[in-house]
Image (spheres, helix red, strand yellow):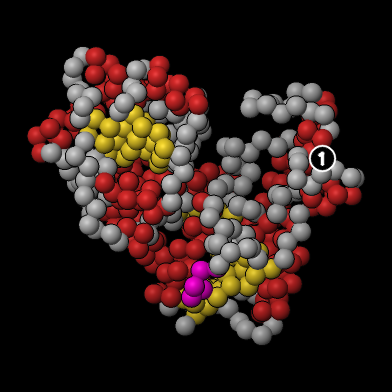
Amino acid sequence: MKKVLIVAYFFPPETVVGSQRPYRLAKYFTRFGWEPIVLTIKRPGKPPVGIRMIETGFKDFGVTIKSMIGFDTEKGFYPQLGVSVSKDFDHKSLKSKIIKLFKEVINFPDSKRGWYKFALESASEFLSKESVDAIISTSGPVTSHLIARKLKHKYGIPWVADLRDLWTNNHFYNKYKLTKYFEKRLELKTLSDADVLVTVTHRFVDELKTLHKDKNIISITNGYDTDDFSDTQIKLTNEFTITHTGKLYNGKRDPLLLFEVVANLINEKKLDKKLIKIRFYGFKKDWLIQDIKKYNLEGFVDVYDFIPRKEVLKKQKESQLLLLLIDKNNKEESVYPAKIFEYFGARRPIIGVGGNGGIVKEILKEINIGMFASNANLLRDIILKYYNEFLEYGEVKFCDNNTIENYTYDSITRKYSEVLNGLVLK
């Protein structure tokens, strides 16, 4: 069996979204003739069973500098230097600008730079005893690509750079021009040595091609793991349930449009509030409670705090509809939210709301798994369509066109294996 070294800073037992892609790939690679070995940092907790791991140390430069100058290592630079940080903090004062630039310098190219030395030492020790056929580095953090590039140069191993997010082309990249100038040069220098660039959307491919013009760049999306949804005994709710799981952001990714439309339909007696239930899991904030009261939706809009992931998946599977909220400012129009693939696994119809929809609107249409609304009129029509179907059949039917199977991690890993096979055969 061929071997692939996966350079992934985020990996279980770390539970952040960024750990899921490398973990699922590592989980399924053996099905396609590749044994994964994961290079990551050592964390508290139990690592995944059955996956070989090289666990390394890590040095946080920010913590080191705070300690050197007598700062509290548990607190940020800004409050300890007398700079108030609010929700809309925009670095207008000279002091805050200097602090921001200082942080960008010590964390260049990212805050995980302290992993570089430890990762190289551990990987080199491993590779002195055992060979691998390919390397995958996945970002963020981009430090993983610096590690992989060094290993490629030292050992001559084919290398795939996997970008879950763009590097300097990232729409949320907000560093100073001077920092971006040097970081863009670093990106060009680093990724020019990768044999293949893989990213997660076709729009990211187009954006990467503007910077890396001669590179082989392909899209392999994220996906869902069928093992997470193996319980087939879950029954649909008796009510017309619309469920959202995960975080919300007031003014950016919030359910105000849904509340407005539902309130109007109830006032017009086109929705029976005794039959409808709207549920939010994993996010209980005062502003959300106030918005529910503002539209007089108490009693059939329920808000719950954190519940275990297993329960989250159950709530998704039992729902008539799943609610997917997109950033209103269209910054995410080139991005698939991680939540969408989890919703695919639940195999329930999806209502997407917010902005112009971007690639989320495209994929919902492609798979025929739901509908997207960018305004109140569209959302009204969609809700009435599904509600009338619920009244007629007692449930909202799930009708995809079978292409949803392309987004299982089994299928995703097969595509990745084909990329690796192509490199080995060169």
Which is more toward the observer, 255 or 337? 255
- Residue of label 1: 102
Left or right: residue 374 compared with residue 9: left
Q: Nearer the viewer, residue 96 or 293?
A: 293
Coordinates of residue 172 in the picture (x, y in percent): 59, 37
Asked whether 305 falls inside the magenta stretch, the response is no
For the residue marked with disc 1, what is the amino acid? Phe
Residue at the extreme front: 299
Residue sticking out furthest to the bottom: 129
Q: Is residue 408 above or below residue 120?
A: above
**What is the chief secondary structure element of the magenta stretch?**
loop
Tell me: 24 left or right of 386: right
Residue at horizontal 75%, vertical 48%? 108
Residue extending farthest left: 392
Q: Residue at x 76, y 59 (%)?
A: 59
Q: Secondary structure at mark 1?
A: helix
Q: Which residues are magenta?
A: 47-51
Residue shown at 50% from the left, 26% from the top: 286
Q: What residue is at 81 percent from the left and 44 percent from the top?
A: 72
| Above-or-below relation of 167 to 243 | below
Number of numbered discs overlaid on the protein picture: 1
Does residue 182 appear to the left or right of 358 in the view shown?
A: right
Please give left or right for residue 377 compared with residue 328 in the image.
left
